[in-house]
Every structure is written in C-alpha cells, then in structure tokens.
Amino acid sequence: MKDSRSGIRYRLFDSDGLPWASRLDWPWLFLLSLLTAFLGAVLLGVYLGIWIRGKGRSALPLWIYSTLALAYVACFAISLTPHPAVADEIALCGFALWFLGAFTLRREVIRYYSEREGIVFKISPLLTALFSVWYICGLLRADYPLDETGKVPSGVLRLTF
C-alpha cells in the first residue's frame, strides 16, 4: 500500500515475506495478548490467516479467526445487556473456534513449509494446544546457521522448531 500524499509505502509483511509479528518471540506475543485482554491474540490469528492465504494455502484459518473476532465483539456487547446468558454460549463456541483455528493454521503452516523446503516441518501439537497462535507465529522466522566467517552459507536454510 502507498500513501499518495507522503509517498510512504506500507507493507503488510516484512521484506522476507513473513508476518511482522514473527520477529518477536512467542512469549512476548503472549504478554502483548494479555495486555489487550486477548483481543490481540485473535487479531494475530486473523493476521496469520491472511499471511497463509497469501501463500496460496487454505483460507480456513482466516475464516475461523475472523469468526472468532466477531464472536469476541458479540460476547462483549451481549454481556452489557440485561440477558448476558447468551454470552456464555458464544464464549463456549469461541473456545472451540480458538482450538480449531490453531490446529488448522498449524496444518497449513506445516504443509507450506514442508512443500517449500522438501522436508517435514514439525510443529508440536501439545505446544500448539497450549500456546496456539503465539507458538506458531514464533516458529515462522527462519534461523540461518552461520559459518566461521559469520555469514550464511549458500543454499542453507534451517527452520527453528
């Protein structure tokens, strides 16, 4: 995107084509989510869904996290009404969507990196269940092993996990 008035370019992803949030370690992303009452975590899921869709993968994680964001807002709005019991059912559905979104995003990321690198990209199902989008986002940044001169050898890519 480009702002026509100032000539400043805005990019949704960094120069490596990865989400900007992948520059942060997942415990920091978790802390930021705590500070935003977990709305930041849902929005991180939407952002990662946009990223994986842009890589030619399924839009299912994007749809799940978008639905979860709407449920989050609806749950908050309904809890302010005289009949907040409906918010409990929405929250329960949101809880299920949270796990469904994490595991569909995990599957799409595994498929993307496995096809791209030609090796099986492993993402722990236990850590995915416990830390969801924070954990997956923390794995997206490639880790380049350096040679004795401090440079990346040509043709070497090692993904952290």
Image (tube, rainbow, N blue to C red):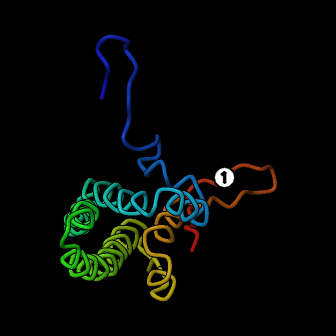
Residue 156 in view in this figure: no
Q: In the shown orientation, is residue 86 left or right of residue 149? A: left
Q: In the shown orientation, is residue 7 left or right of residue 16? A: left
For the view shown, which residue lies furthest in the bottom direction? 126
For the view shown, which residue lies furthest in the top direction? 5
User: Which quadrant: the N terminus?
Assistant: top left
Above or below, comparing residue 11 to residue 78 in the picture: above
Location of residue 146 by image quarter: bottom right
Say which residue appears at 21% left-offset and 64% top-offset: 81
Above or below, comparing residue 17 to residue 45 in the picture: above
Amino acid type, mark 1: Val
What number of labels is visible?
A: 1
For the view shown, which residue lies furthest in the right direction? 148
Q: In the shown orientation, is residue 37 left or right of residue 7? A: right
Nearer the observer, 38 or 5: 38
Residue 84 in view in this figure: yes
Q: Secondary structure at mark 1?
A: loop
Residue 108, given in percent of the width and then of the height, sits at 31, 72
Above or below, comparing residue 20 to residue 133 in the picture: above
Residue 77, given in percent of the width and then of the height, sits at 23, 60
Residue 13, given in percent of the width and then of the height, sits at 40, 44
Say which residue appears at 60% left-offset and 53% top-offset: 154
Q: Which residue is mark 1?
A: 152
Above or below, comparing residue 17 to residue 53 in the picture: above
Nearer the observer, 92 or 149: 92
User: Which quadrant: the C terminus?
Assistant: bottom right
Q: In the shown orientation, is residue 126 left or right of residue 67? A: right
Residue 38, given in percent of the width and then of the height, sits at 43, 64
